[in-house]
Image (spheres, grey):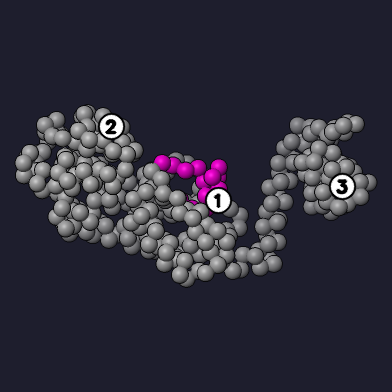
Amino acid sequence: MDRFEAMRSLVASVDGGSLSAASRSLGVPLPTVSRRVSDLEAHLGAQLVVRTSRKLILTDVGHAFVATCRRVLDELDQAERAATGEYRTPRGDLLITAPVMFGRLHVEPVVLDFLNDFAEINVRLRLADYIVDLVENQVDLAIRIGQLPDSSLVATRLGAVRWITCASPAYLAERGIPQSLADLDQHDCISFDRLYSTDSWTFQKGTEIVAVPFSPRFAVNTATGALDAALAGAGIARVLSYQAAGAIADGRLVPVMEDYQLEPLPVHLVHAGQTIVPLKLRAFTDFAIPRLKSGLRAVEQTLDHKGLA
């Protein structure tokens, strides 16, 4: 008995609802399909399906075994494709997701350089300030900012970013520089409400995490909008370091509340775990990871140069 062929016959019978349907889909005589399933049951010493005049019904043992068969056959198919050369040349489509501003500033330039080097790979880059489910949306790679939950995802740490509280020099000259958490109550605050609640900001005071409530003078759902408002002198904004680094470096924004910074947030590139990693995905990770790491190091070096170590 060829166990792989027997498993294919069983799975095809279950998918088609009958041995006859499996015979048609596999192009194999009906008696052959029936014999394969029976031989498999005899080999296992267990009944996998209940045959009725109209359909097949899986037993409890059959349900578990068919799920295993699907996984084994999928891995076998991947191995065969790899052996025949499908995975030898990077080609195909990649779907990548990232937060909007991080994607625009850091991921898109890397993708464009990558496309110049890999003519047979196409990339779709989706930018969104929310978590996209990789499996459900068939996403190949994603940038995740923050602590990762336990999962089956394969993650590569790229670096870290931190929250920066900042305002324009003109605003601070007119309203003063807040020195304590309580001082924020006397200032106009700009809320970026796509990432966190609009009614409080969280700071770290020594070992204590403190939530400071406020009523936003201006609320916007993109980091770009919050930065534009801060640059226009509308108030104090709180954004991530990579978002504000350029404006801080050239003096258009000034950090405040530096004694109350939270711990940095890790940045990861993640993808779903696979037995055999497609070469298109491996090619992109090999190309992108060192460049993305370098970009995040440059952000930190910019802030360190401004005394924000």
Residue hosting label 3: 23
Q: Are marks 3 and 2 in contact (CB under 8 Å)?
A: no
Horizontal side, residue 182 vs residue 119: left or right: left
Q: Which residues are magenta?
A: 130-142
Residue 63, by quadrant, is: top right
Residue indicated by mark 2: 198
Asked if residue 207 is positioned above or below residue 28 in the image, the reply reads above
The residue where tag 1 is placed is 273
Q: Which residue occupies the foreground of this view, 235 or 201? A: 235
Per the image, label 1 sits on a secondary structure element best described as loop
Label 3 Cα neighbours within 10 Å, binned few <14 / some 14-19 / many ≥20: many
Measure the alpha-carbon separation of dots 2 and 1: 36 Å
Label 2 Cα crowd, 10 Å radius (few <14 / some 14-19 / many 20+) = some
Q: Amino acid at mark 2?
A: Thr
Label 2: state its secondary structure: loop
At 70% across and 61% down in the image, what residue appears? 80
Residue type for callout 1: Gly
Q: Nearer the viewer, residue 5 or 136?
A: 136
